[in-house]
Structure formats: C-alpha cells, structure tokens
Amino acid sequence: MYDVIVIGARCAGSPTAMLFARQGYRVLLLEKAKFPQDTLSSHYLHMQGVALLNRWGLLDKIRDSGAQPITRQSYQGPDVRIEGFSLPIDGLTTTYAPRRYVLDPILADGAVAAGVEFRQGCAVRDLVWEDDRVVGVRYTTPGGIEGTDRARLVVGADGMRSLVARKVGAENVIEHPRMTTTYYSYWSGVPANFELYERPGRWIGVLPTNDDLTLLMAYFPQGDYNEVRKNVEPAYLDAFRTTAPELWERMQSGKREEQLYGTGHQENYFRKAYGPGWALVGDAVNHKDSITARGITEAFVQAQSLTDHIGDRLHDDDALKAALRRYENDLSGEALSHYQGALNVAELKPEGRTDMLRKLVGHQDHIDRYFSTLSGACSIDDFYNDELLTLLDQG
C-alpha cells in the first residue's frame, strides 16, 4: 500500500513524486518508457522553471549536462526588433533548453534520491476502484507480468492522451480548436541565443540546447497541416528563408544533424483536475499550443502547487478534498493567463503585438518586463503598469 502512485515520470510526474516523497510519503512512480528516451518538446525552461529546479536542488545537474546557458532573447516581427531578457527570479539570470533525454532522467533521479520507488517500462492498463473511489492501478511489467498496487492518491502525469483522465472521465472544462502545426530539428554550426521571428502565418523559434546543437522550430497554421506534412522539408526550410532571412544566412554554414520532428495534434484544453482518489498534473490536466514553450515550466509549477496544497493532509478526507479544490482553483489563475497568451500567439497574426512592441523600442526596462511576462517573472497585470499605459497612450 502506497500513499501516492504517480503515473508518468517526465516533467510533471517525477517532480510530483519527488515532492511527495520529501514530505515523507511512500510513493510509487510508474513510467512506460525506459530512460533515457527522447520525446516531442519545445525544450525551454522559463525563468520560473529554472527557479524551481534550483529550489529542488537539481539545477546544477542541468548546468553540468552540457545544456548551453541562455542569457539573451530577441523577437523580430514586421518592422520591429527588440532584444533583452527576463527579470531574475531568486537572483537567477540564466535559463536553459535541455534535450528531453537529458532532462527527464535528471528529474527521475531526483525522485529516486528522495525515496521514490521508480519502475520503468511499466504500462498502466487500468485503475482500481472501490466504492466509487480510485484506490490503485493495474499495469504490465517489462517482463509481461500483470501487477496491481494500491494508494491513497493516484496522480495522472501521463500527458495529453492521459489514461487516468480517460478512465475517470475527466471532462474538458475549457477547450479550443487546434491552432498550429510545428516541425523542428537540431542543427550544428548555427550559434544562437533565444530567438523568435514572426510574420503573418509563420513563427520561428530558435534555442541553443545540448551538445553545441541549436533547436530550430517552424510553426504553421493548423489549416496547413496536411499540405505541410506531405512536403515537410521544403516547407520547413522555406519558413526560415521567408520569415528570418538573417537566420537563414547563418543556417547556410550549418548542418541539420537529425530528422525533422513534428506534430499537428496540439490540443488546447483544461480538464477537471481531481476527483475521489485521483488528480491530474502537467499535460494531463492542461495542454496548449507549444508556441510559447510553457509546458515544462507549468508542469513544474503544478507539481509544486499540488504537493504544497496537500502537505500533511493526504489521509484526512475533508482536508484532502479541500486541498485538491485549491489546487484546481490555482489553475484558473496564472495557468489560464498563460493559456490565453499561447492561443493569442498561435493565431499567427502579429499585427496587434508588433504595434505595441514598436512603442517599447528604446525603453529597455519595459522590453525586459515584456519578456518576463512569459518567463513567469512578471504578471500581465504588473506589466501593464501606469508607466507603460502612459507610454502606450503617447504612442
């Protein structure tokens, strides 16, 4: 009998398991993959996520992994270019974009170090119910043996297609259509900072990652998905040539080192976050277009929020229900704001955004605060302070 079983050991699951274990609970962490294993990702750790890794004692492992430090960010849209960086959090001034086959094992190792029992290669098949409450899971081991374990709380950290969400009937409480399709790969010989380029109908993201490679991502409207996937490489290269000509010139001296990865299935939703004996974190509870690269950071934030709210109240029925309700309410605050922001960017219509950014040129403090709204260092309400509103009115 465990206190908590967490299904999924990537960016949401491993931190959740680790934090519960650090509170003294007996935790089982189940993962169907065998690490290290890559996965589709936009990679970036926003300042808020970096601060949590530092708080958890895991940031040095990211630094030591060879992930290139990121200290500058630029955005270039129609007739405007700004450059700056997020305000610090907890004194930290550097972010990273580690490969997932690097990041995920670091998170899982952190869970194991906290006392979590971690089983890889285990495919969860079903949940165990008792009196209309989830009380455990059924899974298959790598050797094909059927296993069953029970727990006070089962946490689904098993992604956009969450089995836990499906089995408990967690409905979508907010939902929007798919917005973009994206394809990306890794290049050598293309040095970069964190760079963003936009024109109507296209978005380019550039991030330095591990092994001196640079992640180059291209975004297209969802309506172009079928056409793009039939001619992926020409569409991908043309997006860079027509959206970011200066970057395109740099790419001529570089080399694509891996295949093109991509997806047109980026769902946008919030699901019901909890019920009797279960809770959801990460992409299982909230998924949005990856264009703002908030997924990893928000998985960290949700892991911290869930475990903080529950604290030592896991075995008190009323207190646990109240804690889970507070966790769900948290999602309607900052997470909802970032969700709406991602959908706005994913429209691939830069006009309103670039009109505002042109007015920020020459005002570095406002530019840095603008970048901080996405990093989690500055809220949207704090960004639109009286000084900024006066500047925008004057423009």
Image: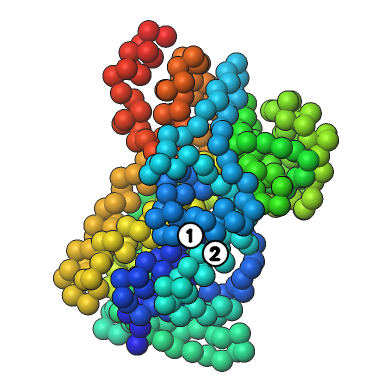
Q: Is residue 99 left or right of residue 107?
A: right
Mark sitting on residue 106: 2
Identity of the residue furthest to the bottom in this view: 145
Q: Is residue 261 left or right of residue 64?
A: right
Residue 269 location (% of width, % of height): 43, 51
The location of residue 270, given as percent across then percent down, is 39, 53
Which of these two is toward me, 209 or 296? 209
* Left or right, 338 with reference to 274: right
Q: Nearer the viewer, residue 21 or 31?
A: 21
- The reply to whether residue 336 is visible in this rendering is no
| Residue 11 point in image, percent of width and height | 49, 60
Tell me which amino acid carries mark 2. Ile
Measured Cα–Cα span from mark 1 to mark 2: 8 Å
For the rendered model, the colour scheme is rainbow
Query: Image check: 175 left or right of 234?
Result: left
Residue for point 74% across, 25% down: 245
Count of picture labels: 2
Q: Which residue is mark 1?
A: 58
> x, y percentage for residue 115?
42, 77
Residue at image position (29%, 57%) is: 328
Q: Few, some or many C-alpha atoms within 10 Å of disc 2 (few <14, some 14-19, many ≥20)? A: many
Q: Nearer the viewer, residue 82 or 175?
A: 82
Along the line of sight, which residue is nearer the eye, 256 or 162?
A: 256
Is label 1 or label 2 in front?
1
Please tell me whether residue 313 is drawn above or below residue 152 in the rendered image. above
Cβ atoms at labels 1 and 2 below 8 Å apart: yes
Assign a secondary structure to mark 1.
loop
Quadrant in the rendering for residue 90 = top left
**Element class at badge 2:** helix
Callout 1, which amino acid?
Leu
Seen at 21% across and 71% down, the residue is: 313
Q: Is residue 246 visible?
A: yes
